[in-house]
Image: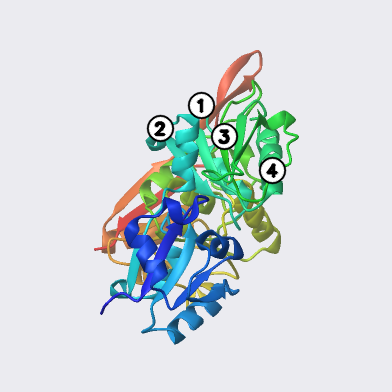
Amino acid sequence: MTAWLHIVGIGEDGLDGLTAKARACIASADYIVGGKRHHALVGDCSATRINWPSPFDALETKLRELRGKRVVILATGDPLWFSVGNRLAACFDASELAFYPHVSAFQLAAAGLGWALQNISCLSVHGRPIEQIKPQLQQGRKLLLLTSNGQAVADIAALLTEAGFGPSKLVALSHMGGESQARFDGLAESWVHEVPDLNTLAVECIAASDAQVFSVGYGLPDDAFAHDGTMTKQEIRAVTLAKLAPMPNALLWDVGCGCGSVAVEWMRAAQGARAIGIEAREDRRAMATANALNLGGFNLPLVAGMAPDALKDLEAPDAVFVGGGLSAEVFELCLAALKPMGRLVCNVVTLGSEQVLLEKYAVHGGSLSKLQFAQAVPLGGQMGWKPAMPVTQYSLVKK
């Protein structure tokens, strides 16, 4: 099939910044879809203009009605980098689409700042929780953020300050490459600028002396989470995540998720990693939701109930963690639901649950370990070890 849907990236310099091929595509279009700003950038042409419909499903429906016509969609910068191109590529066959990328906002900002793009974390908080930048907050790290509006810059400055990164240097850039290009410099802790809605925010992360800086690896401190004391503790959690092996876009079932510590760290550990939490208690589901938002702006769907009943009709997982409510039935259901090469990890502390794991180990193989950690505590005038309750851990990769 010949491509009929042409997605053209455009910048503040309008037609002058496009290749000859992209300009010819616009000139010969039957329909042009874009925002009012995009339409103004291309000036007069014979095509029928269509403004962005909302929601996106309405755009998909409209485009399908135009199949066979020559349709151009205008997008800012690179259509396949945090833009409409990703959604279109998922909705239409590749043979129907042609992409014409422009210089992205990330590239323009990096060039203006003299930053090497390969050393920068590039994210979008356009229509997304700003908390998703939290896993990136590391001393010396540089971020480029596409924001949703001018107020978002002030909100991000406040978030950075609250997280202990108030000394971070901020540069907000708007209308890059155009006549109205503007730059606003400041520190997160003293940010006062009013920034235009269309902007890209550069952040050079600088931690204050009292900042609590979290690693992007496994094993956040327990006090990073809201919890009621019943949770997978830091050291056990680190080992557990290593066995679960988070991977990009993979789905975890966190069975008996409690405050969601394992699910949250799973999502922090790999790009696009997702999790579903199964938890009977409403108060713990509330804590899990709060932790997912606070530690990364994640969406953590939660199923109210207990396994095995609560596991019915869920999307097949790439990994399953059973942190509570283990039984022989739950074990077999989770193993059956796993995708091939999926990972199953069970942590138990009771003798009855340990017996279940011994029986399953004899049948299915895998790995069985006893984990125990101890903390140094005052003992008289000296120091001694206070052991935590031992955890029996079973792990298996499904063949």
Tell whether label 1 touches label 4 (CB within 8 Å).
no
| Res 167 seen here | yes
- How many numbered marks are there? 4
Tell whether label 1 touches label 2 (CB within 8 Å).
no
Of badges 4 and 2, nearer the viewer stands 4
Say which amino acid is labelled 4.
Val
Few, some or many residues within 10 Å of mark 2 (<14, 14–19, 20+) = few
Say which amino acid is labelled 2.
Ala
Q: Mark 1 points at which residue?
A: 140
Dot label at residue 83: none
Q: What element carries label 4?
A: loop
Q: In which quarter of the image is the C terminus?
A: bottom left
Few, some or many residues within 10 Å of mark 4 (<14, 14–19, 20+) = some
Distance from the alpha carbon under mark 4 to that under mark 3: 15 Å
* Label located before the other in sequence (4 or 1): 1
Q: Name the residue under label 2.
A: 116
* Label located before the other in sequence (3 or 1): 1
Q: Name the residue under label 4.
A: 195
Few, some or many residues within 10 Å of mark 1 (<14, 14–19, 20+) = few
Distance from the alpha carbon under mark 4 to that under mark 2: 25 Å
Say which amino acid is labelled 1.
Gly
Distance from the alpha carbon under mark 3 to that under mark 1: 10 Å
Q: Mark 3 points at which residue?
A: 203
Say which amino acid is labelled 3.
Val
* Label located before the other in sequence (3 or 2): 2
* Label located before the other in sequence (4 or 3): 4
